């Protein structure tokens, strides 16, 4: 009966850690492929300090593998070979003499998924594997995106430094490879885009374009990227005034230079449109002979309406542009010409087609004259036989 009573005691020693052997470690850890994770760990074991201190060796093994024959994934025993697939990626961190068994896992790979056990060895008396407190590691697909850092907004013509980093990556394992792509990088040397840092001098045309940082894990052979849209501030440019007639469908005139004089017939209705390219959008305002116009006469988009313009409503109209990076203005002179009741006044569209009408009428009259002359000649020769026939009919 004694052996039967001792058997549960033996089983109990295998099913739970011995009281003097303790291990504090997470039971489950998840990390994305190619990234790094630190697993905090501490342990204790029985030891009498008055003994001469023999070397203290600690190991991490794959679960289910023999600690006597299998290669560990990490150890501080330089005489023990570690697994080639984990060498340099699985590392012990901390001071084992202070009972620190923390494990750093870098450049995680799908094949790393599984369970791991910790073992301690010191002298002849301490040789123990903590089989009951296993570390279960799960490696999932990479979904982490890089972070792109720079000061916003970017300013046209000003040198800017951008940096790209991948959160939760670490020095363990193979290094990361960075690259940049984007329309704003076309004038740069391709070699300058193969770094985690980028120097860029943005242009106005770079506003709204995309810039992408690509990060590749050389060991895991996986790539992740992040795309940002550039917000480039730039001063006003391409200031233009366009004149639209109310009854027209297209642009009658575009003003590109200051002081241009435009003749307008009295009574016509116009729209003056001021446009400018800038970021952020500039503030537009209209002035008539140096005096600011009532905001109710203009729209936020810079359109000034002039209905049924009178003879005394001409003069200099100026569009002024206010912007943090610079100001501009553009002026035109409307010369209003009075219309007479005795004259035949035409619109700007009819005036353009009037010479064509006159030409057609002139051609029609010339054609009719030619046909009349030809017809009379033909009748004369047919009826009288020409000049000779006429003389023959005269009496002798």
Image (cartoon, rainbow, N blue to C red):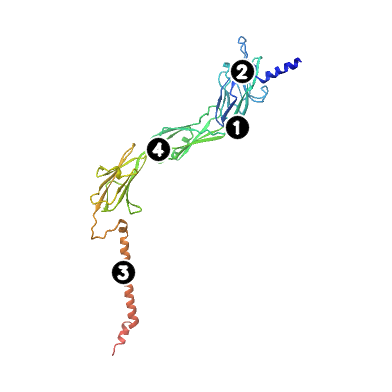
Q: Which mark is residue 110?
A: 1
Q: Which mark is residue 23?
A: none
Quadrant housing the C terminus = bottom left
Residue under numbered circle 3: 365
Residue 389 image offset from top left, x and y in percent: 32, 84
| 3D distance between C-alphas at marks 3 and 4 | 65 Å
Q: How many marks?
A: 4
Between tags 2 and 3, which lies in front? Answer: 2
Between tags 4 and 2, which lies in front? Answer: 2
Q: Does 227 appear above or below 393?
A: above
| 3D distance between C-alphas at marks 4 and 1 | 41 Å
Disc 3 residue crowd, few under 14, some 14–19, many 20+, Cα 10 Å? few
At mark 1, the secondary structure is helix
Disc 2 residue crowd, few under 14, some 14–19, many 20+, Cα 10 Å? some
Q: Which mark is residue 232?
A: 4
Query: Farthest residue toward the right?
Result: 1
Q: Is residue 82 visible?
A: no
Considering depth in this image, is 211 or 88 the residue closer to the camera? Answer: 211
Sequence-earlier tag: 3 or 1: 1
Considering depth in this image, is 17 or 358 the residue closer to the camera? Answer: 17
Query: Farthest residue toward the bottom?
Result: 396
| 3D distance between C-alphas at marks 2 and 1 | 30 Å
| 3D distance between C-alphas at marks 3 and 1 | 94 Å
Residue 289 image offset from top left, x and y in percent: 24, 45
Sequence-earlier tag: 2 or 1: 2
Residue under numbered circle 2: 22
Q: Does 350 appear above or below 274?
A: below
Disc 4 residue crowd, few under 14, some 14–19, many 20+, Cα 10 Å? many
Image quadrant where residue 183 sits = top left
């Amino acid at each position: 009966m004694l052996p039967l009573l001792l058997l549960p005691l033996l089983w109990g020693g295998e099913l739970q850690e011995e009281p003097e052997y303790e291990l504090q470690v997470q039971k489950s850890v998840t990390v994305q492929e190619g990234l790094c994770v630190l697993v905090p760990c501490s342990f204790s074991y029985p030891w009498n300090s008055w003994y001469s201190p023999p070397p203290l060796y600690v190991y991490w093994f794959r679960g289910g593998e023999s600690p006597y024959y299998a290669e560990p994934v990490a150890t501080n025993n330089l005489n023990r070979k570690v697994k080639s697939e984990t060498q340099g990626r699985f590392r012990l961190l901390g001071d084992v003499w202070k009972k620190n068994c923390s494990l750093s896992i870098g450049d995680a790979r799908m094949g790393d998924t599984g369970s791991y056990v910790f073992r301690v060895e010191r002298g002849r008396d301490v040789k123990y594997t903590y089989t009951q407190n296993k570390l279960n590691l799960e490696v999932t697909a990479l979904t982490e995106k890089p972070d792109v850092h720079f000061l916003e907004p970017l300013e046209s013509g000003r040198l800017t430094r951008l940096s790209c980093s991948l959160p939760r990556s670490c020095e363990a394992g193979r290094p990361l490879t960075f690259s940049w792509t984007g329309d704003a990088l076309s004038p740069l040397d391709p070699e300058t885009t193969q770094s985690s840092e980028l120097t860029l001098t943005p242009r106005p045309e770079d506003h709204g374009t995309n810039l992408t940082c690509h990060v590749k894990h050389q060991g895991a052979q996986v790539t992740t990227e992040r795309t940002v849209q550039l917000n480039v501030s730039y001063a006003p440019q391409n200031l233009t005034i366009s004149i639209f007639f109310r009854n027209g469908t297209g642009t009658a005139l575009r003003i590109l230079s200051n002081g241009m004089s435009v003749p307008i017939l009295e009574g016509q209705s116009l729209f003056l449109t001021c446009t400018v390219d800038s970021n952020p959008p500039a503030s537009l305002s209209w002035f008539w002979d140096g005096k600011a116009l009532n905001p109710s006469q203009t729209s936020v988009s810079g359109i000034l309406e002039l209905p049924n313009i009178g003879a005394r409503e001409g003069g200099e109209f100026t569009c002024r542009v206010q912007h943090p990076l610079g100001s501009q203005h553009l002026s035109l002179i409307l010369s209003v010409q009075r219309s007479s009741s005795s004259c035949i006044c035409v619109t700007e569209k009819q005036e353009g087609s009037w010479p064509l009408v006159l030409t057609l009428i002139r051609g029609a009259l010339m054609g009719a004259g030619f046909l009349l002359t030809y017809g009379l000649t033909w009748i004369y020769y047919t009826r009288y036989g020409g000049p000779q026939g006429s003389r023959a009919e005269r009496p002798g």
